[in-house]
Image (tube, rainbow, N blue to C red):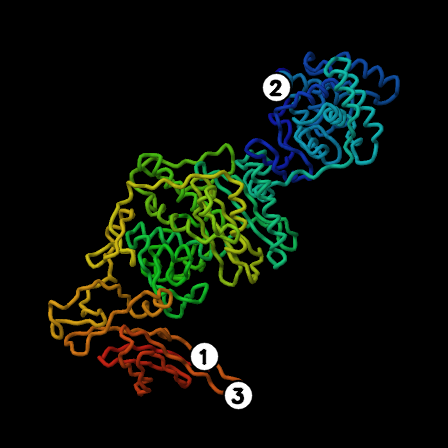
């Protein structure tokens, strides 16, 4: 029974005290620590005791540590003798093993009975654990003054460095502290502490642990004067780790050197941004190949008033235009467009929704890739409407953007302009997945991975599982992503980096900015073959500020961070997912026999099913090419057959303003018979518009200017308001009216009977 009691007398876990949450970098440098829940700086158990400290603590506390069975009879006898002579506790005679037991028993009263228990438990501990493990228990749980417990915490608090980097003098200082931890208080007991340290150093010299030169240098070192604050290199990543790994020591994937430099960049930009009332920013850097977090800056070094402790990387914010590349890639992937297919950029209204471009202007028609690189809103909304809201919504769900949690109809077409919410973590994750898809396709003989769209990792021991290889794409095919990146590479860079393409050493980066409605959020996310960098700038409380625009505030941080990263080669072209075909230069569509200006381009395989160019038509003109003719008015031998680039009237109206060489179709000669097809469309107002007519200072109501575009401007057009004739126009089709309050029908009819109508509501 005594043997059984002896076997089970020692608890399985000697120490159950709460410990600090500690995170280290990829190379095990301390990034930060969060104090234990009981208010103690007690780092998690460390089984590796530095050799210098091991030598010092054994020399000071227990010279026969490696020889005794847990207690030292000679030391106990001497302590018993000296204590009897002094009528009190003069010396303890405890071994390091006994001190470990006493620490685990929370400092029971120092009685002879307690000493006996310590001896019994110490022998049991010696049988269960190795000497080095017992020493590790001691160094991790010994008191070092104040609320500092354990060697690791003490090394950082008193010397601002890791315990493995301590000098002999520093190790000796810490070795004498558990015996009298009150000596470390700043500015007090310095003489006593110095004497204890120096006596230990002399002992180390005597037993040849150090040489005389090391001894002299150690004596010259100063004692610590005040506790240091622990490093807080990645405080918000520490918060994130503590949610799952509270009280643990976690080795992260963060590159300590990169993290520190990104911190400095954010701090520099913060000093400038706060002059405009912009106080918060966050940066995330991912390794595309491993999907590891390389740098994590959750916020600026602002103050508590401006929520400096809030980690914004995983907080939902309006993404502005950041989602546009996903739509462009989806339309390429589905075969709805080719990279440079012309899309309409004209005044547009969907019910009560009236999207506008940032510059308030219109191009009439613009290549889809330019619409993306210039981040034009109207073409993007029209592309989403054409592609299908629900269809695009399914792509976003597969990207696992968790903050897009409502139905597609809840967001409507504004989804593409920031009508939903997302966060920097999910967006960077998605861009990394796109980049990785292209990389893997090139590296695996044209195969994909089944789990490409996976979560990034920040724990060093975790590895991303990309799943199995498959010939089937996961979401987007490699060609669609590559062509999307080719467009994003052309996005105009911020001032100072805008001529990047003329320098050989410039980084090729596919990147996109975003600005939310009301100037509340500014974004910039960029990717190379190897890295993804994401930046958010704004105010944590959602306050908008003038100038809070992606290209002005977030983009400069993005490129400063990319300048810290190594250069990457551009993505390899995924030829197995591409085909070389004839493309009409002007329209970007597949060329027809009417397209005379043709170029050969590699496009995605799905692009082979896109419709051929609808804008080039064959027209019959006279010798001067001033008029269209037919056999009723011109000899067949004198008729010229010419390919003509023709846009719909509303697109042509705005296109001509930006493209002065655009030539409208020539009119039919007056003596020609036949069907002279023509068309017209309203420029203003949009259908079902609600219009407010302002008044001048003298009370006069301003006129409402109606505008239409006609394929043949010289045609006479007749205007009607609620079936009441107003007048006619020719060449310039604009008409001014002052309608009464209420709903009205505007009708225009041209000389050939073509008709267009618009309903409007006049407000007061």
Residue 741 visible somewhere in the drawing: yes
Question: Of label 1 and label 2, which has the lower sequence position?
Answer: 2
Question: Element under label 2?
Answer: loop
Asked if labels 2 and 3 touch by Cβ distance under 8 angstroms, the answer is no
Q: Which residue is mark 3?
A: 698
Q: Which residue is mark 2?
A: 129
| Residue name at image x 63 percent, y 38 percent | 33
Question: Of label 3 and label 1, which has the lower sequence position?
Answer: 1
Numbered mark located on residue 692 in the image: 1
Q: Nearer the viewer, residue 458 or 628?
A: 628
Question: Of label 3 and label 2, which has the lower sequence position?
Answer: 2
Disc number lying in front (1 or 2): 1
Q: Position of residue 254 (x, y in %)?
A: 54, 37
Question: Element under label 1?
Answer: strand
Horizontally, residue 30 falls left or right of residue 558, namely: right
Task: Indicate whether 692 appears above or below 1.
Answer: below
């Amino acid at each position: 029974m005594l043997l059984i009691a002896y076997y089970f007398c020692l608890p399985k876990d000697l120490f159950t005290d709460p410990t600090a949450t500690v995170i280290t970098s990829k190379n095990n440098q301390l990034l930060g620590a969060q104090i234990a829940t009981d208010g103690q700086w007690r780092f998690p158990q460390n089984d590796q005791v530095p050799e210098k400290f091991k030598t010092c603590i054994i020399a000071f506390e227990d010279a026969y540590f490696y020889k005794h069975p847990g207690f030292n009879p000679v030391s106990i006898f001497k302590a018993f003798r000296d204590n009897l002579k002094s009528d009190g506790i003069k010396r303890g005679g405890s071994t390091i093993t006994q001190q470990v037991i006493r620490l685990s028993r929370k400092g029971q009263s120092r009685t002879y009975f307690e000493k006996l228990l310590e001896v019994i438990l110490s022998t049991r501990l010696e049988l269960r654990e190795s000497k080095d493990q017992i020493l590790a228990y001691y160094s991790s749980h010994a008191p070092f003054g104040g609320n500092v417990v354990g060697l690791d915490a003490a090394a950082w608090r008193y010397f601002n460095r890791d315990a493995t980097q301590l000098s002999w003098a520093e190790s000796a200082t810490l070795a004498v502290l558990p015996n009298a931890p009150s000596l470390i208080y700043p500015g007090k007991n310095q003489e006593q502490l110095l004497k204890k340290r120096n006596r230990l150093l002399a002992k180390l010299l005597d037993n040849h642990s150090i040489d005389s030169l090391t001894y002299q240098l150690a004596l010259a070192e100063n004692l610590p004067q005040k506790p240091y604050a622990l490093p807080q290199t990645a405080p918000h990543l520490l918060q994130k780790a503590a949610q799952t790994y509270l009280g643990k020591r976690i080795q992260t994937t963060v590159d300590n050197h990169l993290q520190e430099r990104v911190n400095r960049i954010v701090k520099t930009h913060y000093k400038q941004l706060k002059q405009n009332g912009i106080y918060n920013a966050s940066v995330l850097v991912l390794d595309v190949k491993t999907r590891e977090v390389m740098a994590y800056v959750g916020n600026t070094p602002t103050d508590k008033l401006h929520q400096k402790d809030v980690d914004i990387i995983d907080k939902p914010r309006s993404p502005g235009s950041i989602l546009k590349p996903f739509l462009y890639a989806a339309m390429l992937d589905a075969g709805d467009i080719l990279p440079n297919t012309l899309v309409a950029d004209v005044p547009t209204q969907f019910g009560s929704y009236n999207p506008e471009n940032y510059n308030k202007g219109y191009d009439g028609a613009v290549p889809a890739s330019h619409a993306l690189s210039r981040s034009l809103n109207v073409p993007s909304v029209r592309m989403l409407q054409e592609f299908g809201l629900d269809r695009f919504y399914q792509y976003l769900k597969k990207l696992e953007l968790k903050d897009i949690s409502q139905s597609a109809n809840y967001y409507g077409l504004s989804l593409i302009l920031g009508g939903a919410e997302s966060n920097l973590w999910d967006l960077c994750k998605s861009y990394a997945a796109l980049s990785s898809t292209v990389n893997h396709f090139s590296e695996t003989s044209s195969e994909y991975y089944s789990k490409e769209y996976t979560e990034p990792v920040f724990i060093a021991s975790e590895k991303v599982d990309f799943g199995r290889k498959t010939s089937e794409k996961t979401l987007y095919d490699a060609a669609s992503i590559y062509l999307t990146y080719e467009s994003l590479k052309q996005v105009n860079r911020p001032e100072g980096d805008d001529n990047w393409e003329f320098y050989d050493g410039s980084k090729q980066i596919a990147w996109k900015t975003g600005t939310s409605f009301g100037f509340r959020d500014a974004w910039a996310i960029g990717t190379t073959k190897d890295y993804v960098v994401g930046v958010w700038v704004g105010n944590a409380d959602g306050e908008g500020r003038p100038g809070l625009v992606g290209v002005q505030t977030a983009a400069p941080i993005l490129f400063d961070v990319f300048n810290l990263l190594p250069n990457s080669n551009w993505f390899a072209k995924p030829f197995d997912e591409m085909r070389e075909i004839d493309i009409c230069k002007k329209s970007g569509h597949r060329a027809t026999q009417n397209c005379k200006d043709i170029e050969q381009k590699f496009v995605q395989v799905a692009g082979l099913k896109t419709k051929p160019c609808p804008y080039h038509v064959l027209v019959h003109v006279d010798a001067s090419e001033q008029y269209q003719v037919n056999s009723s008015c011109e000899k067949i031998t004198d008729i010229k057959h010419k390919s003509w680039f023709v846009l719909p009237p509303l697109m042509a109206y705005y296109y001509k303003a930006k493209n002065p060489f655009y030539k409208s179709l020539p009119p039919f000669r007056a003596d020609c018979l036949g069907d002279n097809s023509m068309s017209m469309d309203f420029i203003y107002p949009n259908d079902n518009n609600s219009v407010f007519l302002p008044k001048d200072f003298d009370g006069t109501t301003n006129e409402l200017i109606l505008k239409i575009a006609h394929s043949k401007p010289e045609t006479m057009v007749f205007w009607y308001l609620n079936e009441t004739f107003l007048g006619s126009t020719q060449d310039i089709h604009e008409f001014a009216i002052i309608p009464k309050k209420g709903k009205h029908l505007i009708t225009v009819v041209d000389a050939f009977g073509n008709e267009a109508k618009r309903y409007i509501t006049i407000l007061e």
